[in-house]
Amino acid sequence: MTGEAVAEIEAEEGGPDYGRLQWRIAAGFVLGLVAGILAYTFARDAAWVETLVTYVTNPLGQIFLRLLFMLVIPLLVSALVVGIADMGEVRALKKVGLRTLLYTIIVSSIAVAISIAITNLIKPGAGVDPAEARALLAQGGEGARSIIERSGEAKTGVDAVIGIIPSNFITAMGDNDILAVMFFALFFGIGLLLMSSPRTEVLKQAFEGVFEVSMKLIGLVIQLAPIAVFCFMFNLAAQFGWDLLAKLAAFVAVVLLALGLQMFGVFPILLAFFARMNPITFFKETREASLMAFSTASSNATLPTALRVAETRLKLPPRVSRFVLTIGATANQNGTAMFEGVTVLFLAQFFGVDLSLTDQIFVMVICILAGIGTAGVPGGSLPVIALILGGVGVPPEGIGLILGVDRFLDMCRTVLNVIGDLVCATVISAYSKDVLGDAGAVPAPSL
């Protein structure tokens, strides 16, 4: 998906309306949290609380989740297919495109591995009473329970590896076999990348149309988020009380720690050893893009600034920087992938769901692929997180926990996404002499 195409969708879905939506979500979060804590404090065992949860707040939250589940498969398939196919849209930079794809997969893997390791080490969601967690699990809707039951039948070992390749794509979609669905989308996208003809161009446009429709519908569903967040937070706060506040603070701290390790640990190593560039100089030259990313919380809105910084401040060759940054605005989202990894493990710990090594590898793979296939627009990662939660046996309604603090974390991870794109462009430029010639490659500043 080109940056321009996604930016158009973002303009339709976001803008001032999205800004107001964030305030409504925050209001729903606070009101639900306060109402739930009051119910926990003064009416913990009251019959009316159970009636309210059973017949009002829980059904409303489940409707919101089912709408997201309904849209997640067409969204991910279309976004991943077009995202891979667009790697070859600039024929002169096919080698650059393949290198960018390889770089994205490797660095995203490092990012997700860091986030999962940090969350396993600190365990920000641990410590909740298992009996209360099981009680809340029992309150989940039938749709969430069916997904959880299917997750218990997951294949392991060699069967799990073979199962990634679907024998029937339609069956894989019907079974919510997300790895098999994403494998097909990835394979199909590579086919579109290798085959260029008027007919395949029409097919790619059809996938773009599916993506645009899916994002439009998700934009409508997200308008229900304030009500859903109120319901989620009321249910959780009425069940767990004051412990909820401490867990949220720990979650935010772990997300920021993971993002910081990638920003100030991994990126400087890539710059120093692969691009031969002084990391301090790089961060100074990219301050404008960082500030824009933090203030807008949008990789696509920051794209014009990032392009200008790449060409005027970092002195990168335009043929590389424009290609890498445009693709990277939707396909190289380290911050989003890390956030998804931390969120899934945090909620698994919160609800007392023990994730095996196989489950965590599953989470890691999906986060990496979702970093390529998830659009950088409002609500783009929400259905992915919900689907991963259901796939590993964690109640998807747990996403209500993180939506209230998501705005600030979104601003932080967007900075990592944008800076990660600029790091990618710098490294790829340094390795593109065979494509651009010596004159087009990045000079190697002394360290």
Image: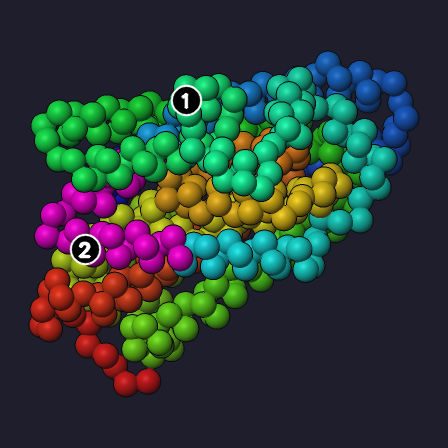
- Closer to viewer: mark 1 or mark 2: 1
Residue 234: x and y in percent read 72, 30
Residue 353: x and y in percent read 72, 40
Q: Label 2: which residue?
A: 95
| Residues rendered magenta in the picture | 79-106
For the C terminus, give its image quadrant: bottom left
Mark 2 surroundings: few (<14), some (14-19) or many (≥20) residues within 10 A: some
Q: Secondary structure at mark 1?
A: loop
Q: Residue at x 41, y 67 (%)?
A: 267
| Residue 293 shows up from this direction | no
Q: Residue at x 10, y 52 (%)?
A: 92
| Residue 168: assigned label | 1
For the N terminus, give its image quadrant: top left
Q: Nearer the viewer, residue 354 or 347?
A: 354
Q: Main secondary structure of the magenta part?
A: helix
Place residue 227 in its image quadrant: top right
